[in-house]
Amino acid sequence: MTAVDSRHDDVRAIEAGAAPTRFARGWHCLGLSSRFADGKPHTVNAFGQKLVVFQSGDGRLNVLDAYCRHMGGDLSQGTVKGNEIACPFHDWRWGGDGRCKSIPYSRRVPLRARTAAWVTMQQDGLLFVWNDPEGNPPPADVTIPLIEGATRDDWTDWVWSETIVNTNCREVVDNVVDMAHFFYVHYSFPTYFKNIFEGQTATQIMKGMGRPDARPPAKSGEPQLLGNTSVASYHGPSFMIDDLTYHYEGMDIKSVLINAHYPIDANSFVLHSGIIVQRTDALPGEAADAMARKMGDFILRGFDQDIQIWKNKTRIDNPLLCEEDGPVYQLRRWYEQFYVDVADVTPEMVERFEYELDTTRPVEAWRKEVEENLARRAAESRPA
Amino acid sequence: MTVRQDNRLLDAPMVPVGCRQCGARVQVRKSSWQQTSVQWDTEAMDTCLERRAGPDDGRFIACEALRETIAQAALDGHVPVPDDHYGPVTTVPETP
């Protein structure tokens, strides 16, 4: 039974607040590098701006502000010429370092012919950009860990998808602590759940059993799915790596899920999902590819359900939580570090916080021990 | 964007616990026998032997000595545990 205290009978007001006007400091994944490596300029709307992504002749992927500093032409409608992107308006040539290299009809490039260039990083087949409202380069210790399977032959290629979501990106980050939605959205039955926030990482560990009511019984000859273990960390504000293992009778299937996003503006973002699956003797070649595609479809279905919620819900800065909810406020305190200047990051934003739920612990045994302890104490405190 | 206070902490705040192994002091709260929250500070991080030996990539799961300390503190009544899982938070009676 849920108790209601009539002394606190006022209507609870939702405080929606405004979405932040600045964008998070950190590495943001723009997707598969191969998508951009075709010698053509690509338009990317991110961080409230229009960007151009292009591969220069030297093979590098570059990210610049899309608007030419000359007369405002859109470089993402231009042409790659050698190592430069040429503006479609007057053919001004811009290098990946943001400097104007030449103006074909002029003897000299004017002073201050420099545009905004983003620091980029390519690893594991993915393109990242560094965003920092203060304009500083990424510190050496702010990195995205390498994903071992992404470059190995015994793993599948990425199954990748991108979706535009019309709400502030805090909604997707909130999912880190939302234990209950695993049951409702992902048809999983968590038996162990843990969040760890520390420094620039926010981790979610989950062990679950498949829900017998949501899963077809194994066909004869096929192994029965027993459960799964998921260890997922946000490395910075937007890139989550999830080591997800499915436990079957007699074998494990290992996969890596990526859940990443970058903001388009304060009220929309691009949501990415990526999957790779390890090939094994039990799951060789094409079977692993099929498994990765199947998982990709499953994740997209989950995203679609999330998106249905997000596009109709309100922003809420003061969620009213019950004891069974996860640490929403502590997660947001961690997330806040990416929206303030480095000098304003407080210890509370980065100090370690743990939230653990372990349903496998023997609760009844604990209760019994408590009763015994209390009885013992009562007996001890009685005057002799 | 100021992050607000967790409404649950207003009703039942975290309580200090010192690890029996190394003395690291953390703030602890339990919403049930199965749930535990632990707030560390920099000093506790520097004191904890297992944390100091652990990885720095967000994958240090837990200090086992601290886990045992907290479990015992709950049994001893030093960390309150709501009695009725579905009711309002109440505390285990303190030692007289």
Image: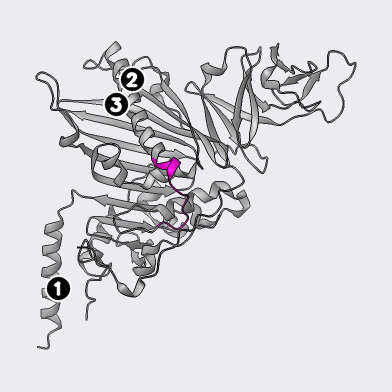
A87 vs A213, left or right, is right
The majority secondary structure of the magenta stretch comes to: loop
Query: Is residue A172 at all visible to an observer of this figure?
Result: no
Q: Residue at label 1?
A: A374
Q: CA distance from mark 1 to mark 2?
A: 56 Å
Question: Height in image: B27 above or below A73?
Answer: below
Image point (10%, 80%), residue name = A379
Task: Find out whether residue A74 is within the magenta segment.
Answer: no
Q: Tell me the kind of residue under disc 2.
A: Arg
Task: Give the image location of residue A326, x and y in percent.
Answer: 34, 52
Badge 1 amino acid: Leu
- What residue is drawn where x is 32% and y is 42%? A205
Q: Which residues fall within the magenta stretch?
A: A309-319
Q: Residue furthest bottom?
A: A383
Per the image, the residue denoted by label 2 is: A293
Position of residue A193 measured from the top left corner of the image (x, y, whole percent): 29, 46
Q: Earlier in the sequence, mark 1 or mark 3?
A: 3
Say which residue label 3 marks: A254
Q: Looking at this view, is A28 or B39 the one in front?
A: A28
Of all residues shown, which one is farthest toward the right?
A: A107
Among the 4 quarters of the image, the one containing residue A148: top left
Q: Are marks 1 and 3 on the same chain?
A: yes
